[in-house]
């Protein structure tokens, strides 16, 4: 990969570390997240244009809190400390950090008073977003206080000579009205970056890199129709054309039209070598009589591997395997080390005993960057903005025994649900929405007739990563329309309920 200007985000354990990195990328600057324990020589060898210290939950003045060597402030690279980041900067350089009194803690929107500073250039608001209990009450020698609030004497400090800056508030969060200006000012006016990280150059550079690595060898890709594997496959296809073969295992547990869409997009539109393996009967056969959720997952995962193995064996020797690993997977799995293959990247897991070299064309990217690249590569919006979908598919949304009849009922209900969410313009603001089919039949009445049919559960959640989520406050009129249509149009369903459980304590899926 061509060398880009680099900014390092030093992670002190803050919940916004990835958000800070994304904000830097949005400024067209490439950045990497590194742990605070990274040694100075490694940091210097990366030749960063700037460094940002993240927030964190600890107190800078306690012995066992994350800290950093004083040397970092002397290597001549501009540093911006955010929240805990500015506190640790202050503490290490001889300023004073202390616990705030009850009335000095600040949380949420806070009014601030700025002095003149490069990092505040162009700011017109005086509202920032705070979240701290500790505060700095004396800045280190050589520093000047450049902002304060009613309760916080040092809301920002700077040492312009050494290019060290720090803010107590969180410029990276959305509620911090002009926070992006602080980051942009730091990057462009202090670090002097030119902004060479754009999707255009990424695509071009990546294609050249893939060509160089792969040459005329053969590449295999397990395509699931999800965003990451789709973008990865199209990118590799751009680089090496027909030497890429995609295997799409259709286990019959997909949503309505999903399998056909994958074929239409990848085979017809992109003209890729696509093998669609239709094995609905095989999977349903294995799932017959099985009701326990983890057993279902295991059966589907294992069967997926078996089908994939059989298909790749038919293809002869393949040298590389494409993985849709993205940057958050790498950060979460141990900071830049090769990512362990996660099951959700390849639908059910990739056989361990097949020898491939792994190609991960998206490993530097955040999800929003993957989407942008995907759109630029010409992949349709419907696929790029599709909600996450679990590898075992409807296998864990048909609660209890999975049968073709029940999958079909669920597919129809889910399609109506998605259709109405899109028509109401709500699909994109929901993180994940789907219908499920509990193993429950209830009594109803239609016309003059008694019905006895399945209950459909609707789920919609807001979330940023699926680890925690809240139930989506769906407008009643939309719910009403969805419910009416499902009961009227789906044979076999006569009642609809909406799930109002957050995670935790619930999970997003019902199984
Ligand atoms: P839960 O239900 O654990 O879901 O709150 C969190 C996210 O993970 C997805 N999910 C899965 N994805 N295989 C997958 O590939 C699975 O077995 C699986 N189970 C849950 C779920 O859809 C949600 O996005």
Image (cartoon, rainbow, N blue to C red):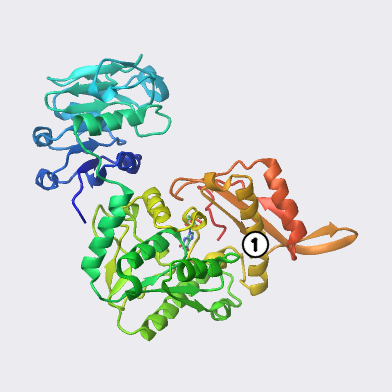
> Horizontal placement of 446 versus 184: left or right?
right
**Percent position of residue 247, x then y:** 42, 74
> The residue tagged with tag 1: helix, strand or loop?
loop
Front-most of 382 and 503? Answer: 382
Residue at image mark 1 = 437
Above or below, 344 relative to 246: above
Ligand 1 lies under 8 Å from the Cβ of mark 1: no
Whether residue 31 is situated above or below residue 386 in the rendered picture: above
Residue 495 visible in this rendered orientation of the protein: no
**Count of numbered badges drawn on the protein:** 1
The reply to whether residue 398 is in sight is yes
Residue 354 x %, y %? 31, 78
Which residue is found at the position 42% from the left and 76% from the top? Answer: 305
**Label 1: how many residues lie within 10 Å, few (<14), some (14-19) or many (20+)?**
many
In front of the other: 95 or 2: 2
Q: Residue at x 41, y 52 (%)?
A: 371
Q: Residue at x 23, y 57 (%)?
A: 337
Residue 217 placement: quadrant: bottom left
Q: Which residue reaches farthest right?
A: 448
Q: Quadrant of the C terminus?
A: bottom right
Is 227 situated left or right of 143 in this image?
A: right
Residue 243 x %, y %:
32, 75
Whether 504 is drawn above or below 292: the answer is: above
- Res 133 → quadrant: top left
Q: Which residue is nearer to you in this view: 484 or 16?
A: 484
Quadrant of the image for the N terminus?
A: bottom left
Q: Residue at x 39, y 28 (%)?
A: 176
Name the quadrant containing residue 189: top left
Q: Is residue 222 above or below residue 183?
A: below
x then y, percent, for residue 306: 43, 80
């Amino acid at each position: 990969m061509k060398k880009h200007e680099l900014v390092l985000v030093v992670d002190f354990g803050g919940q916004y570390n990835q958000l800070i990195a994304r904000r830097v990328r949005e400024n067209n600057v490439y950045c990497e997240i590194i742990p605070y324990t990274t040694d100075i020589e490694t940091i210097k060898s990366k030749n960063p244009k700037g460094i940002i210290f993240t927030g964190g939950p600890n107190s800078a003045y306690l012995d066992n809190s994350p800290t950093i060597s004083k040397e970092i402030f002397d290597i001549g690279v501009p540093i911006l400390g955010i929240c805990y980041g500015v506190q640790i900067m202050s503490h290490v350089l001889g300023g004073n950090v202390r616990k705030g009194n009850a009335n000095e803690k600040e949380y949420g929107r806070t009014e601030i008073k700025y002095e003149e500073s490069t990092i505040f250039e162009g700011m017109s608001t005086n509202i920032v977003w705070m979240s701290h209990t500790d505060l700095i009450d004396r800045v280190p020698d050589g520093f000047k206080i450049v902002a304060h609030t009613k309760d916080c004497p040092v809301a920002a400090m700077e040492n312009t000579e050494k290019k060290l800056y720090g803010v107590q508030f969180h410029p990276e969060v959305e509620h911090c009205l002009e926070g992006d200006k602080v980051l942009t000012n730091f990057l462009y006016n202090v670090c002097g970056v030119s902004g060479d990280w754009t999707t255009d150059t990424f695509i071009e550079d990546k294609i050249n890199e893939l060509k160089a690595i792969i040459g005329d060898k053969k590449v295999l890709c397990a395509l699931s129709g999800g965003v990451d594997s789709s973008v990865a496959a199209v990118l590799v296809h751009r680089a090496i054309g027909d030497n890429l073969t995609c295997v799409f295992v259709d286990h019959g547990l997909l949503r309505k039209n999903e399998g056909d869409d994958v074929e239409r997009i990848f085979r017809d539109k992109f003209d890729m070598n696509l093998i669609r393996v239709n094995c609905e009967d095989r999977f349903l056969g294995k799932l017959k009589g099985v009701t326990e959720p983890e057993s279902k997952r295991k059966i589907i995962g294992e069967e997926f591997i078996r089908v994939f193995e059989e298909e790749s064996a038919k293809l002869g020797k393949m040298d590389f395997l494409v993985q849709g690993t993205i940057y958050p997977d790498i950060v979460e799995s141990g900071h830049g080390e090769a990512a362990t293959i996660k099951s959700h990247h390849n639908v059910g897991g990739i056989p361990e005993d097949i020898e491939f070299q792994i190609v991960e064309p998206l490993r530097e990217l955040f999800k929003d960057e993957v989407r942008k690249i995907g759109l630029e590569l010409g992949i349709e919006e419907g696929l790029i903005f599709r909600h996450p979908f679990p590898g075992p598919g409807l296998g864990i949304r048909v609660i209890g025994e999975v049968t073709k009849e029940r999958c079909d009922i669920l597919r129809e209900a889910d399609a109506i649900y998605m259709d109405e969410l899109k028509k109401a313009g709500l699909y994109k603001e929901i993180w994940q929405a789907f219908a499920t089919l509990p193993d429950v039949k209830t009594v109803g009445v239609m016309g003059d007739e008694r019905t006895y049919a399945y209950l459909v559960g609707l789920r919609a959640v807001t979330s940023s990563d699926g680890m925690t989520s809240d139930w989506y406050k769906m407008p009643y009129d939309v719910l009403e329309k969805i419910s009416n249509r499902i009961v009227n149009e789906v044979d076999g369903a006569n009642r609809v309920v909406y799930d109002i459980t957050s995670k935790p304590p619930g999970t997003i899926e019902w199984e």
